[in-house]
Amino acid sequence: MHGGAGRLHWLILDVGVRRPNQPWKWPAWLVLTKPDRERLTTMLRQNEKPVWHAGAELRGCFQRIGQAVELDRDGSSVSRLAALINELLVLVLEMFSLQRIALDESLSGSRRTVELLLGELRDDLSQLARPWALGDLAERCGLGPTRFVQLCKQLTNMTPTQYLTHHRVEAASRMLRQQADATIADVGRPCGFASGQYFATVFRRHLGQSPTEWGFCFHRPFSGSTSASHAFSVQASDAITIYAPLLTRSPVGLSIARAPFLSCSIRFF
């Protein structure tokens, strides 16, 4: 919230939560009654609306919090801040109650926790590179292995191992397309493959080509009978990968192979 010209104030309360399905642990100095605390927790956990219209009373309370922070000298404002933050939370609870917010229980469930982890694995190469075991993934979500596998299959139609392998191969194929001089070692380990041989085996199983052949297809100088080359990709909803290995001098190369869960890539040359 604005605390004056060119100044913003943020209030961050750590309630000990690192995943959506964990119970919240409010600080001991919170004086809300247990029913009010439970209502506030539910309303905060089960909605994703990021911005709310604050009334004058709530804005004034937040401004007083900012002033107390500015005036604090070696903890002199701690008691005042605790009182003001309690007041602020009461006002937030009243605001939620008046606006009758729509709640979504799934946002605080185990399914949501697994969904967020899977998204992290998909989007963060450093996470793909880690030597994940099933127990590690399940523990990360606060679940047993059986329940974790069940939710993973519900969300992706894949087991955790298949999901990891799919995105590791996808990441490797992108790196090979983008880096003309990349070696198997350059690509395999950053994508989570323990050895170059294992990487090459898995890559061929999923894309029908070795990593070297795949990269060669995208970076070899054009020498066909047409004047230009074109490449595009689409998402495979039917679990068929289409690719065009550069094995002949024919104007168009097109090959189809079964490779579950991967994107389609079609290249004309």
Image: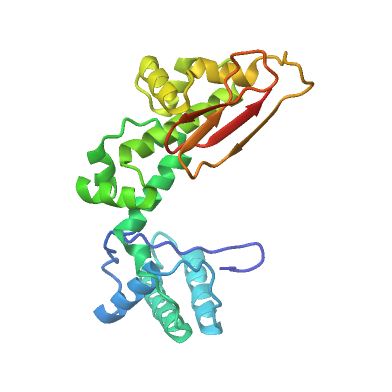
> Which residue does the image show at 43% across and 69% down from the upper left?
47
> Which residue does the image show at 51% across and 66% down from the upper left?
50
Front residue of 67/49: it is 49
Q: In this view, does 31 lie to the left or right of 230?
A: left
| Residue 24 percent location from the top left of the image | 29, 64
Q: Which colour scheme is used?
A: rainbow
> Which residue does the image show at 56% across and 28% down from the upper left?
243
Front residue of 222/79: it is 222
- Relative to 228, say whether 43 is above or below: below
| Residue 46 percent location from the top left of the image | 38, 69
- Relative to 133, say whether 70 is above or below: below
Q: In this view, does 46 lie to the left or right of 222?
A: left
Residue 135 seen by the camera:
yes
Residue 144 seen by the camera:
no
Front residue of 225/42: it is 225
| Residue 192 percent location from the top left of the image | 39, 28
Q: Is residue 264 left or right of residue 230?
A: left
> Which residue does the image show at 27% across and 81% down from the upper left?
35
Where residue 231 sits, quadrant-wise, is: top right
Quarter placement of the N terminus: bottom right
> Across the whole image, how many numbered discs are drawn on residues?
0
Quarter placement of the C terminus: top right
Residue farthest to the right, as pictured = 227
